[in-house]
């Protein structure tokens, strides 16, 4: 396979194991989560590997099962959900680890198998907290703001979230049901 300019297409994008979440950075790079290899990789527009986000901190693995990823367009942060670590990890636009939001639990600020993530125009992060049956709103600095939706609102195992340009929040659930509401 070749690009339109004649350069051959690299095979590194073709051989990745089970990629899950993917997004585009503000610079046009592609970020891909690889749960099976416990890595999050960044590729340039031509598919060439640029970097792998830091995988350990002080000898501890940062990722166990990275699932979904988004970019905060306001500051360029790369935000990754880790399904098995029950947390959301924040990296700056250069791939440097900043901080983590969440841990296993049921109260505010806790997660149980987070999946989808997206960011709003103010830099807040929206998190699908699947096994707690709710959707969190988290500040750009990783502080819990509020629950947007809970099981009391009829939400059941949310696994995907996205915001449209019209400020509609779209939430996909494990059952296949999709909810659309004003954000």
Image: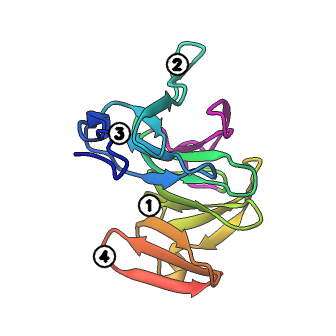
Residue stretch in magenta: 85-107
Can you tell which mark lies on residue 176? 4
Q: Earlier in the sequence, mark 1 or mark 4?
A: 1
Select label 1 or label 2 by which is in front: 2
* Residue of label 1: 130
Give the alpha-carbon distance from disc 1 to disc 4, as whole Å: 13 Å
Q: Quadrant of residue 84?
A: top left
Check whether the beta carbons of the residues at disc 4 and disc 3 lie within 8 A of each other: no
Give the alpha-carbon distance from disc 2 to disc 4, as whole Å: 35 Å
Q: Earlier in the sequence, mark 2 or mark 4?
A: 2
Q: Is residue 147 above or below residue 1?
A: below
Can you tell which mark lies on residue 35? 3
Q: Quadrant of residue 49?
A: top left
Which secondary structure, mark 2?
A: strand
Magenta stretch contains residue 7: no
Magenta stretch contains residue 100: yes
Q: Is residue 110 above or below residue 66?
A: below
Residue at horizontal 50 percent and vertical 44 percent from the top: 86
Give the alpha-carbon distance from disc 1 to disc 3, as whole Å: 17 Å
Select label 4 or label 3 by which is in front: 3
Q: Earlier in the sequence, mark 3 or mark 2?
A: 3
Check whether the beta carbons of the residues at disc 1 and disc 3 lie within 8 A of each other: no
């Amino acid at each position: 396979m070749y690009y339109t300019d004649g350069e051959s297409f690299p095979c590194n994008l073709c051989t990745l194991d089970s990629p899950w979440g993917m997004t585009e950075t503000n610079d046009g790079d592609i970020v891909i989560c690889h749960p099976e290899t416990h890595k999050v990789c960044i590729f340039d527009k031509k598919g060439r590997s640029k970097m792998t986000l830091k995988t350990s901190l002080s000898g501890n693995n940062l990722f166990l099962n990275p699932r979904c990823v988004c970019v905060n367009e306001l500051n360029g942060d790369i935000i990754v959900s880790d399904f098995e670590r029950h947390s959301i990890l924040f990296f700056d636009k250069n791939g440097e680890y900043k901080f983590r939001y969440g841990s296993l639990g049921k109260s505010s600020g806790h997660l149980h198998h987070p999946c989808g993530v997206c960011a709003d125009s103010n830099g807040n992060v929206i998190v699908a907290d699947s096994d707690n049956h709710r959707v969190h709103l988290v500040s750009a600095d990783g502080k819990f703001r509020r629950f947007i939706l809970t099981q009391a609102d009829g939400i059941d195992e949310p696994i995907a979230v996205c915001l449209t340009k019209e400020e509609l929040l779209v939430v996909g659930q494990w059952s296949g049901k999709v909810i659309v509401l004003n954000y």
